[in-house]
Image: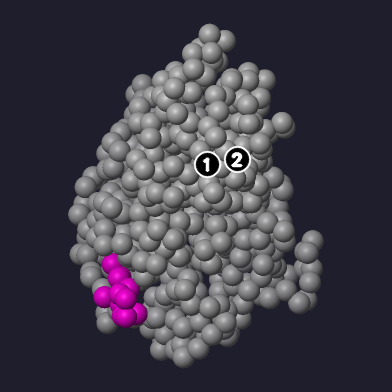
Amino acid sequence: MRAAVLRTSVAWLAACALACALGGPIACGPPDSFDGLVGGSLDAGSEADAPAVELRPDRELAPPRPIAPLSQSWINGPRPRFEWQLASGATGARIELCRTRACDGEKKTLDVAGIATTLDEDLAPGIWFWRLVSTTPESFGTKPSPVWGLLVRGGPSGKSAPNGSIVDVNGDGRADLLVTLEYESGSGAAFIELVAFLADKDDSTSFVTTHGGRPVVGAFVRSPDPPIAANDIDGDGISDVVFADVLGSDAPAPILVTVPGSATVADALDVDRATLASLPPLDSTPNLAAVGDLDRDGWGDVAVTTAHFGVATFGTRSGLGPFQYLLQLGPGPNDDAGVPRTSAFALTGALDRDGDGLSDLVLESLEPEAPFFLYSGDPERVFRFEIPTLAGAPTIGAASAFAAGDFDGDGLGDIAFVTTAGGKPAICFSRGSEPIAGMRLVCWSPASPSAGFGSSITAGDVDADGRDELIVGSSDAGIDILALDAKGMVAAQHLDTPFGTTLTTILPGRPAPAVWAATRADGSAIGVFAGRVLATRLDVVEATRFGRTIR
């Protein structure tokens, strides 16, 4: 049995001719084959094979709503599992996989009965766009869903869970870079602008920095180091930007600001501050992370941590929804003496540690027996709280920074964090394949650590070998690249470079080397690296400081 059936070219041409006659938006022409792919795995809600029939277009049939993989996410494997919400009256969906957002080139078409399918054949690595129209046994819709982007990294066929996301604020399929610029006014006062540098190459090693004599896109902020996150919060297929700012001048209170992405360059981020949607003031400047989709509702989510709370905000069609309090240190709206303590500052981005297709959330712990807490995504309970226990691990201190990657190449999300071991700075790895109870850490310490070693970390497949590396920066520049081999040993390479104070991953790599960015210690420039090689240097001469915050 198969849940999915590819229609014959004859049937498609007949249906297309009718759609064009009715003025429907579906492009006319036979669907491309799936290069041998003839169906997806049998999923709940699917039906047995039936003879292919000629479908008629139905202009009144609303499109499905895409659910997973979340737009702009990446997967470690080559076979995504697609999920959607059926429209009223529909029994399935037609998936179109395209190489461009307009679906005007290479395209693969698959009809599926039900609400989900897993591909039976590998997708080639790279950016894919996908959209849906509704189907019934007799008809197909002419109204498509929003077009979502997906980065396929390749890797083990059985592990294709989402494990990160790119930033694409104009929806062109290229990973962009968000940075802050600090200027001095004529009175000597500093002001900050959050700017998006838009990639003008598919490999994101070159960026457009001006548009009509000004930064391409930008929004003025008051915070000197505003934390930044980006996720598709409103489900339109384009990355939205979330940043922390301060409200007021007398007793400024931090707020979260959301700015929707736009396919129109002139509109993306370039909005009047009065139009920005914000959440209620927080108790202290928060840390942010875009954490994928925590509850599998198809809206991108954001984790927020402050001095007192670990919280999540949930995406909706109109932007960020309300806070949900998870942990707290002091009295508050969710006061519970039994809630474990967290420092509530360090947290991961999108990570699927257990391979269930849902993003998990990792926060720094103050508990002496556990370096972090894990909140596993759960659509029924939102989160499933887990405290790891360690077996045979060295005595380590509290974690101060986290990064997520597939460090052992098994397709599952692994955790790396900065801590101390034996009184020295250290990096510890926690594998997704290790059970949360009795977890064994692999830790590494530099012989002669740079000043501020581990002040910033990020992950990517630097050498395109199928395993992610951890990129470790320092406050006075210099970078260490750590690789975890199949035997659990750590190999390290030091890059003697003036960059390294603040790090971010632009493209995670595989099959090409990862593309990542690092700032100079003096804030004068940003280096964009392809693998271990400096590919681009970004300088903005008007700014007094550049890239104190990057994403």
As for residue 487 lying within the magenta part, the answer is yes
In the image, 480: left or right of 152? left
Q: Nearer the viewer, residue 483 or 183?
A: 483
**Is residue 293 visible in this depiction of the protein?**
yes
Q: Residue at x 32, y 80 (%)?
A: 487
Q: Nearer the viewer, residue 541 or 372?
A: 372
Residue 143 location (% of width, % of height) = 59, 23
Label 2, residues with CA under 10 Å away: few <14, some 14-19, many ≥20: many
In the image, 101: left or right of 494? right
Q: Quadrant of residue 451?
A: bottom left
Up-down relation of residue 106 to residue 306 (above or below): above
**Residue type, label 1:** Ala
Q: Residue at x 50, y 88 (%)?
A: 391
Q: Residue at x 39, y 81 (%)?
A: 443
Label 1, residues with CA under 10 Å away: few <14, some 14-19, many ≥20: many
Up-down relation of residue 25 to residue 472 (above or below): above
Q: Quadrant of residue 441?
A: bottom left
**Residue type, label 2:** Ala
Q: Quadrant of residue 376?
A: bottom right
* Residue that mark 1 sits on: 4
Residue 107 location (% of width, % of height) = 39, 32
Up-down relation of residue 157 to residue 396 (above or below): above
Q: Nearer the viewer, residue 304 or 362?
A: 362
In the image, 290: left or right of 199? right
| Residues at discs 2 and 1 in contact (Cβ within 8 Å) | yes
Magenta range is 481-491
**Is residue 273 visible in this depiction of the protein?**
no
* Helix, strand or loop for disc 1: strand
Nearer-N-terminus badge (2/1) = 1
* Residue that mark 2 sits on: 113
Q: Residue at x 20, y 54 (%)?
A: 533
In the image, 422: left or right of 366? left
